[in-house]
């Protein structure tokens, strides 16, 4: 299963000044599989130290000296670790915080050895107040569920991917191509981008019951993880209740009282923060949009949520798969699924080495309320993005944003073909979200 992150790993490997790499992302997004495949393809030897399965190796990191660590690992595992030929993969590294701290010394004292680390609940260790992060000596790679293009490659739709990557403004578009691509978007939304689910779907595209069973298993697995990071039974209960309401909160400004009116806002807020650290949801903060960077002008008290994955989102909603296939994408759950799909694709357009953050714009002045689904920073410009069903509609909020901040361009993402209207509105079909930055270069 090809991942775009493989190209990032290759660039990392070829750099003379590379640092140990820490892969971050939610459980089951494919971190371990990615590294294992990369190690087998590009190294004579791959040594995997899984601290969850090999707890005896934890004591090998009592010392932070790489020479002592490698000697100890070789004795314990019986494996030879040759810095020139070995990829050392430290998996489930959150179970050995000392190993995270030791990464900086691999950079300083054993730079020839390629070291990659990952962990399913790593964020909780990194965000612990008592943990000292080796700043400046470790690189990061953020991994998300498969993007729409990665999903297409998994299905063997290479011709579609090649067309998507080459299409440009002014190209003639055949109706059968447009309709097929929209159908594939809907297919992606139903399946989602979780690697295990996609792999099963590739083998049997007709078995929707088994597909939903796998998605339910993943959701249950996330619930079972709550005990690993909830410090009290009360926190565990809050996590369960908030996660059960998470799918109801997608696409709307979150109010703690809506999630659960019986619990204090601080408890709901803390539960959401834990779910965010686990990667099960992403915060979309409101930004004034008045300047760059967008993150400098946010209101952390006002936010929306994005679910980890479209497929898991639909499974959590218990959407009937047969009815789903008969509906227009924008009509499913009042169009919220389309916003979820777009947000999930936008995350994959952010830099791989930074924690992706999305924003939206809102105005609540009397007689002048407006909301733009997403704000996107491209080069030195801030562009409003509206998710719509077709070319119809007034785009009142988008125009209000453009008038307020004298923005010359706006973006509409919808089911209509690609177009550039009035030299100001770039209309992108759902299946071309991955090409947004490339298309923007043509008009800016």
Image (cartoon, grey):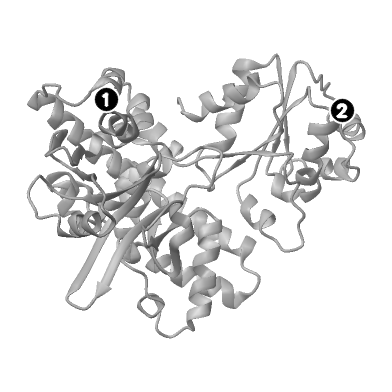
Q: Secondary structure at mark 1?
A: helix
**Is residue 61 toward the left or the right of residue 272 in the image?**
right
x and y percent of residue 65 in the render?
90, 37
Towards the viewer: 323 or 9 = 9
Alpha carbon separation for disc pair 2 and 1: 48 Å
Q: 10 Å neighbourhood of mark 1: few (<14), some, or many (≥20)?
A: some
Q: For residue 349, which quarter of the picture?
A: top left
Res 314 visible: no
Q: Residue at x 54, y 43 (%)?
A: 354
Q: 10 Å neighbourhood of mark 2: few (<14), some, or many (≥20)?
A: some
x and y percent of residue 5 in the render?
51, 30
Q: Residue at x 21, y 57 (%)?
A: 403
Q: Residue at x 23, y 51 (%)?
A: 386
* Residue 305 vertical placement versus 68 (above, below): below
**Is residue 403 toward the left or the right of residue 131 in the image?**
left
x and y percent of residue 241 in the render?
45, 72
Which residue is at the far top?
A: 44
The quadrant the C terminus occupies is top left
Towards the viewer: 369 or 55 = 369
Q: Secondary structure at mark 2?
A: helix
Residue bearing the label numbered 1:
164
* Residue 264 vertical placement versus 139 (above, below): below
Which residue is at the far front?
A: 406
x and y percent of residue 27 in the render?
54, 47
Mark 2 or mark 1: whose residue is earlier in sequence? 2
Tell me the tag on residue 74. Answer: 2
Tell me the tag on residue 362. Answer: none
**Is residue 440 toward the left or the right of residue 259 in the image?**
left
Q: Residue at x 41, y 45 (%)?
A: 214
Res 390 visible: yes
**Is residue 102 toward the left or the right of residue 345 in the image?**
right
């Amino acid at each position: 299963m090809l991942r775009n992150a493989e190209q990032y790993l290759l660039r990392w490997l070829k750099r003379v000044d590379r640092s140990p790499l820490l892969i971050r992302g939610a459980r089951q997004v494919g971190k371990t599989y990615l590294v294992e495949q990369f190690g087998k393809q590009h190294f004579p030897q791959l040594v995997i130290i899984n601290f969850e399965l090999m707890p005896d190796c934890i004591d090998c990191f009592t010392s932070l000296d790489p020479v002592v660590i490698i000697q100890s690992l070789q004795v314990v595992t019986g494996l030879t670790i040759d810095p020139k030929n070995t990829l050392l993969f430290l998996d489930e590294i959150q179970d050995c915080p000392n190993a995270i701290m030791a990464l900086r010394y691999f950079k300083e004292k054993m730079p020839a050895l390629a070291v990659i680390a990952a962990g399913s609940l790593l964020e909780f260790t990194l965000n612990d107040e008592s943990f000292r992060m080796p700043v400046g000596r470790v690189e990061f790679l953020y991994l998300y569920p498969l993007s729409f293009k990665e999903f297409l490659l998994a299905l063997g739709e290479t011709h579609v991917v090649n067309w998507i990557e080459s299409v440009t403004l002014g190209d003639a578009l055949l109706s059968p191509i447009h309709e097929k691509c929209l159908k594939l978007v809907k297919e992606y939304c139903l399946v989602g981008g979780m690697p295990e689910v996609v792999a099963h779907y590739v083998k049997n595209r007709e078995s929707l019951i088994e597909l939903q069973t796998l998605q339910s298993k993943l959701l249950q697995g996330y619930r079972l993880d709550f005990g690993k990071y909830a410090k009290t039974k009360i926190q565990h209960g809050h996590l369960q209740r908030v996660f059960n309401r998470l799918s109801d909160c997608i696409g709307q400004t979150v109010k703690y009282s809506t999630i659960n009116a019986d619990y204090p806002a601080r408890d709901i807020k803390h539960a959401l923060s834990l779910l965010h650290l686990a990667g099960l949801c992403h915060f979309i903060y409101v930004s004034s949009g008045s300047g760059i960077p967008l993150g400098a002008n946010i209101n952390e008290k006002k936010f929306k949520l994005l679910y980890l994955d479209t497929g898991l989102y639909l499974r959590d909603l218990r959407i009937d798969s047969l009815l789903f296939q008969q509906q227009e994408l924008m009509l499913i759950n009042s169009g919220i699924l389309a916003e979820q799909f777009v947000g999930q694709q936008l995350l994959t357009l952010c830099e791989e080495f930074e924690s992706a953050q999305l924003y939206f714009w809102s105005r609540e002045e009397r007689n002048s309320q407006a909301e733009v689904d997403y704000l996107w920073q491209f080069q030195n410009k801030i562009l409003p993005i509206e998710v719509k069903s077709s070319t119809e509609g007034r785009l009142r909020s988008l125009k209000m944003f453009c008038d307020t901040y004298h923005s010359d361009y706006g973006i509409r993402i919808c089911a209509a073909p690609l177009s550039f209207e009035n030299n100001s509105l770039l209309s992108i079909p759902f299946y071309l979200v991955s090409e947004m930055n490339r298309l923007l270069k043509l008009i800016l």
